[in-house]
Image: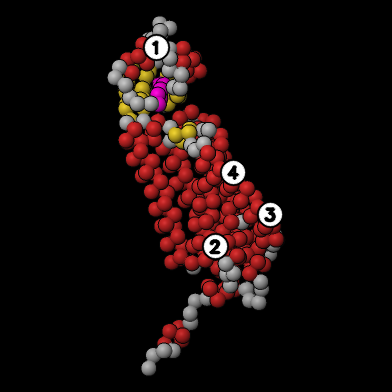
Amino acid sequence: MIQAKVYNFMGFRRYALAFSVFLLLGAIASLSFQGLQLGLDFTGGTQVEVGYKTPASVEKLRAQLESNGFEKSVVVHFGSDRDVLIRLQGKPEQGLSDRVYEALQSNGERVELRRVDYVGPQIGEELREDGGLGMLAALITVMIYVALRFQLKFSIGAVLALAHDVIITLGFFSITRLEFDLTVLAALLAVIGYSLNDTIVVSDRIRENFRKIRDTPAAEIINESLSQTLWRTLNTSFTTMLVLISLFFLGGELIHNFAIALMVGVAIGTYSSIYVAATVMLAMEIDREDLMVPEKGELVDDLP
């Protein structure tokens, strides 16, 4: 059997820690001072769906709306290049959809008004709270599952890695001022699942090697485990990235931010599955005794 090359990942853990701290501080600072550019789903507003007989240019429509006083309108295609979705943030006003319809007809082009939806600020507030609670519940569930399936030190490492990925992804959206809406929130929950999958694979190999390899420092066992799962992790991330890049370019403007959030999350999740979770376990001085299964004879030692 060919032995996989062992890379000294843990030898660079201090540099990885400095890199993670830098990213986390930048993300937290941006989130604290300027927050997120919340979309209509969270702030409330009006959503207007219109249709055209011929392909419509969103750039021209956006300029047309701005010239009629709708300066912060979001105009995107959905379904086809003849279907247009217009989002207007702010408190819904009576007659707003009629004014939008008139603005779109100002150049003489025929427009079909298909649907108008209103999202009130109270609903947006509830969505923010429910989204935050959803992510918190996901992290708590992950911690309980990993603690039961593996060991408490694995659980703490996995949850810190997931929190690391979520905070940095949120920070990216805060710094770039990309709109944060329900699709991005869904992407964050998907990132939690994806990162957990990588971390579970690595953790399972670490546990297996701790039980098989004797009289070897923990750092070396973790290095060997990470080296054995490295190409599996990179191949999975690479193929996932190919799908996300295709989704970004071919999926339409409506899901651009969804694809971006997943791309950032997958990249950071790949890094954290190698360095963050394993480094936390090593810092907590995980050893073979933590992972040993009690022998059957030990279960009856205390019986009379």
Please give the label number shown on residue 26.
4
Task: Tell me the SS state at disc 1.
Answer: helix
Q: Tell me the crowding category of disc 3: few under 14, some 14 to 19, or many 20 or more residues within 10 angstroms, Cα based.
A: few
Q: What is the magenta segment's predominant secondary structure? A: strand
Question: Where does the image place residue 125, in percent across and percent down from the top left?
Answer: 35, 38
Which residue shows up at 39% across the image and 15% down it?
Answer: 52
Q: Secondary structure at mark 4?
A: helix
Q: Amino acid at mark 2?
A: Ser
Give the residue displayed 40% in from the left and 24% down from the top: 88
Q: Is residue 32 above or below residue 62?
A: below
- Graded by Cα atoms within 10 Å as few (under 14), some (14 to 19) or many (20 or more), the crowding at tag 4 reads some
Magenta segment range?
Answer: 83-89
Q: Which residue is mark 1?
A: 103
Disc 2 crowd, CA 10 A, few/some/many (<14, 14-19, 20+)? many
Comparing marks 4 and 3, which lies closer to the viewer? Answer: 4
Q: Which residue is mark 2?
A: 203
> Mark 1 or mark 2, which is nearer the start of the sequence?
1
Q: Position of residue 19 (x, y in %)?
A: 65, 50
Drawn side of residue 253 relative to residue 17, left or right: left
Precedes in sequence: disc 2 or disc 3: 3
Counting residues from the start of the chain, the first of labels 3 and 1 encountered is 3
Can you say which quadrant of the picture contains the N terminus?
bottom right
Mark 2 falls on what kind of element?
helix
